[in-house]
Image: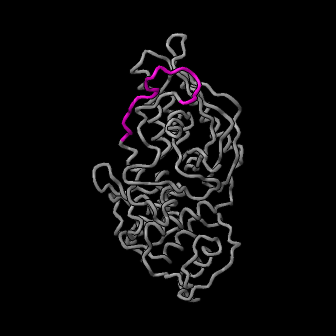
Amino acid sequence: MKKTLAFVACFLLLFSAVDSVSMLSPVHAEAQATGIKGFTSPAELSISGGKTGKNQGVPFFYDVPLPEAINQYIPGDLRGHWAESYLLHFVYSDILKGYEVSKGKYEIKPEGKITRAEFVTLLVRALGLKNEGPGIYFDDVPTDKWFYEPISIASEKGIVNGVDAKHFAPERYVQRDEMAVMMIRAFKGTLDQSGSLKTFTDVPADHWAKKEIDEAVKAKVINGYKDNTFLPKNPATRAEGVKMLFTALVAQNSNLPQDQELINTVVNMDKELLEALQVMDFELAGEILDQYSFGFNNVMGSYGLALYQEILNKEDNHLNFTNIGDYKVDILAKSNGIANVKVSNVTHQIVKMKDDTIIAEYKETLNNIIYLRKMADGQWKAYYNMPDVSK
């Protein structure tokens, strides 16, 4: 009950936790076909059991169906997978799109092979790359195909050259050595390559991608297999590609954000949402959500606004939103384009009033972990937010 109340009470973007996170390590959410733990609809919530304020036995929040858009963030085939946490980061931040296997049911197919076009698309999305000029024209990449733009962007950046002068082979499975080369080209100059070099028995000195494979090893982006092989010609899986990309994103350290920039992002987001809710301006609140959040957080934040609006639609009451205390923001980890912060010490209070009489109230003290991504325009936005339950 407490988790679900926290889910709807936080102004910060309303997501109930399922696991603890203390570093910029992957999220380990319990993804299930039926949803994520804590995503129950708050149809029967009431303020009771020691909570402050008055309650007359009616629900504080009303049952509002979860938006259909949430389904794409709840893939049904990741629970227990070795790369579940890496994959969920990319799902929540709209980098990785699932397959709709039936109405409202999505799967990621983590062990499915990933094509060259798909991997390039993930790479372009992960780094937020944009075209700054014409890319290479390939005969097998027509302009009306979904992969035209990302391949054009990657070729313009020098990340890909094609399998020959006229062909890219977009639907061929990407090989592990090709993936390493694309990664190093894309992340050039942003990775710390002070790690130890590892010699793979199946990557000879004259292998066309040995330089890039070595650099990826020193950057700790790839490890190879326990038998000291890399299997360079093997087709990569979606899980392998995502893990490598996420690891590289976390390792980027050439242009770290200032702590104050990250602090301002989460504090301003919360304060501006509070101000909009205080005057019941839900349109403005929605615009603020769009300004400071995207992906999973944006969808759940919009759902939270819908819950508040449903109260006003069903009752002749007023909601009063206030903050108590001063924000404490700890920077847990950061890289060039991804960061992890903890917000605490502020209590959110919602009071339901009829005229000047308090009908019910709820208080929830923030102790939240927030994941942020730097967007293509330089703006930091939140894509994942949850209470810290590690203590």
Find out whether residue 63 is within the magenta segment: yes
Dominant secondary-structure state across the stretch colored magenta: loop
Instruction: Say which of 270 and 283 sits in front.
Output: 270
The answer to whether 79 is drawn above or below residue 270 in the figure is below
Quarter of the image for residue 116 reads bottom left
Find out whether residue 366 is within the magenta segment: no
Q: Is residue 121 visible?
A: yes
The percent position of residue 281, horizontal first and vertical second, equals 50, 23
Q: Residue furthest left?
A: 102
Quarter of the image for residue 348 reads top right
The percent position of residue 359, horizontal first and vertical second, equals 51, 17
Instruction: Say which of 292 and 131 sits in front.
Output: 292
Instruction: Say which of 104 and 154 sits in front.
Output: 104
Q: Is residue 178 left or right of residue 368?
A: left
The answer to whether 81 is drawn above or below residue 263 in the figure is below
Q: Is residue 128 left or right of residue 58?
A: right
The percent position of residue 350, horizontal first and vertical second, equals 55, 25
Instruction: Say which of 84 and 51 sits in front.
Output: 51
Residue range (magenta): 49-67
Please report the residue visible at 64 percent of the width from the left and 53 percent of the height from the top: 22
The percent position of residue 121, horizontal first and vertical second, equals 44, 61
Please report the residue visible at 55 percent of the width from the left and 49 percent of the height from the top: 375
Please report the residue visible at 68 percent of the width from the left and 60 percent of the height from the top: 253
